[in-house]
Amino acid sequence: MIESSPWRFRARASLIHLGASAAIAAAAAALVFWLWYPWPYSVLAGGVGLFVLITSVDVVMGPLITLVVFDPRKPRRELARDLAIVIALQLCALGYGLHIMFGARPVVLAIEGERFRVVRAIDVVRDELPQAPGDLGRLSVTGPILVGTEAPTTADEQFEAIQRAMAGADLGMRPKFWRPWNPVGRREALGYGKPLDALRQRYADRGVEFDAAVARTGRPAQQLRYLPLLSTHGDWIVLLDAGSGDVVGFAPFDAY
């Protein structure tokens, strides 16, 4: 039977491998999208695209290699060795991919004056972490922490901040300027926040989507303000409660 139809056994082994790979990918998805990249950061920090790229290659290539190397006519020890090598390579590839995603995870949602910015772990100026206040010196592994930023005060600090910003390190990426999210940050956000009416008219052709974003906050549009939100994978808006200054929602609209 084995001599006459080895490909049937190969196909069966490949399908079993595919099912196991899909289960592992599902577990990895839970880790990535529940802890590292909660919505909307799965979009704003590119988590969805990166995860699909990593897991699709990993999930497909492992079973395909099994389809090639699995031969029931091989000695059992040789067959076990071949499959162990395939699985080890597949797990290493997945582990490396998850390592990349961990390094690129969003860690801070920082207000920078009249805008917010999503900051990834790879964007943070690491040598300034010891200067961050309190627990902000430890980068989050459970989604971004909301922080305020304190603008430099001395002429030397201002000049240095401009130079670093021109090199790509804005205030939100620099832990020495981070501050805990508190009433000061809320007042700053509300001071720059704008009513939704003009933006709603600007995106009149996307009214259903706009209204759905407002509805998710659980507040009427009149009780909301917005600020631009900058990220590496698209510009959105942050929705603020007009009374408290708390961040209550997000929406995929460019405010500029």
Image (spheres, grey):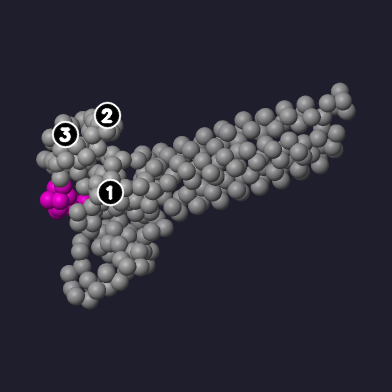
Quadrant where the N terminus lies? top right
- Provide residue 146's location: percent of width, then percent of height: 27, 49
Whichever of callouts 3 and 2 sits on the residue coming sooner in the sequence is 2
Closer to the eye: label 3 or 2: 2
Tell me which amino acid carries mark 3: Ala
Q: How many marks?
A: 3
**Residue carrying label 3:** 221
Q: Residue at x 66, y 33 (%)?
A: 17
- Marks 1/2 in contact by CB < 8 Å: the verdict is no
Tell me which amino acid carries mark 1: Leu
Is residue 44 depicted above or below 139 in this figure?
Answer: above
- Provide residue 244's location: percent of width, then percent of height: 13, 42
User: Which stretch is magenta?
Assistant: 181-193
For disc 2, the neighbor class at 10 Å (few under 14, some 14 to 19, many from 20) is: few
Q: Residue extending furthest right?
A: 3
Q: Which mark is residue 229?
A: 1
- Provide residue 112's location: percent of width, then percent of height: 23, 56
Q: Is residue 165 magenta?
A: no
